[in-house]
Amino acid sequence: MSAILDPKAWVARAEEDYRLAQSALRRKRPLLYGACFHAQQCAEKYLKALLVLRERDFPKTHDLTALVALCEEVGIIVPVHPDDLDRLSAYAVGVRYPGEEPLPEEARAAVQIAGKVRRFARRLLGLK
């Protein structure tokens, strides 16, 4: 099985993103945009792991709302508010370039949202 069709391969990448997001916040001078970006990436990869598990194709997208809609098509109801998903989706690209910087509370919220997606996905995947 190729890695892209193995949910565990997606989980491994998602976990690295989650650890990076958490680590970015714990620094003496937090890396706010890094925390937001990696939080979004964590959630995205966990949603894609669920879709791979259910053998559902998905487009190359960073739109978490679109990925959740695909999850719903295969009977997976992700218990995260759509506004939170939209907020997190915005960090896929926008924070990687100069402009408006996320505030510390926004970065913490991004990691918390990613954590919700992570906990839910890990339960469905049978992981601790």
Image (tube, rainbow, N blue to C red):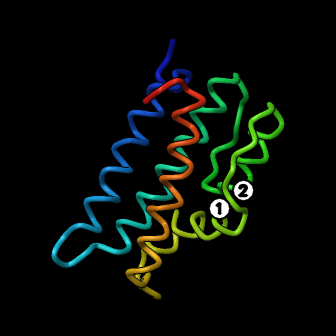
**Residue ID at (63%, 24%):** 53
Q: Which mark is on residue 59?
A: none
Q: In this view, does 56 lie above or below 70?
A: above
Q: Is residue 33 above or below residue 56?
A: below
Rendering quarter of residue 37: bottom left
Residue where numbered disc 2 is placed: 65
The one nearer the camera, 68 or 123, is: 123
Could you tell me if the residues under marks 1 and 2 are in contact, i.e. CB atoms within 8 Å? yes
Is residue 54 found left or right of 107 in the rendered image?
right
Query: What kind of residue is marked 1?
Result: Leu
Seen as rendered, the residue at the extreme top is: 1
Instruction: State the image coordinates of residue 29 (x, y, percent, origin top left).
Output: 20, 78
Residue where numbered disc 1 is placed: 85
Q: How far apart are marks 1 and 2 (CA)?
A: 6 Å
**Residue ID at (28%, 73%):** 31
Callout 1: helix, strand or loop?
helix
Seen as rendered, the residue at the extreme bottom is: 100
The one nearer the camera, 17 or 84, is: 84
Q: Can residue 49 be seen in this view?
A: yes
Q: Is residue 96 visible?
A: no
**Residue ID at (35%, 67%):** 34
Instruction: State the image coordinates of residue 18 (x, y, percent, origin top left).
Output: 38, 50
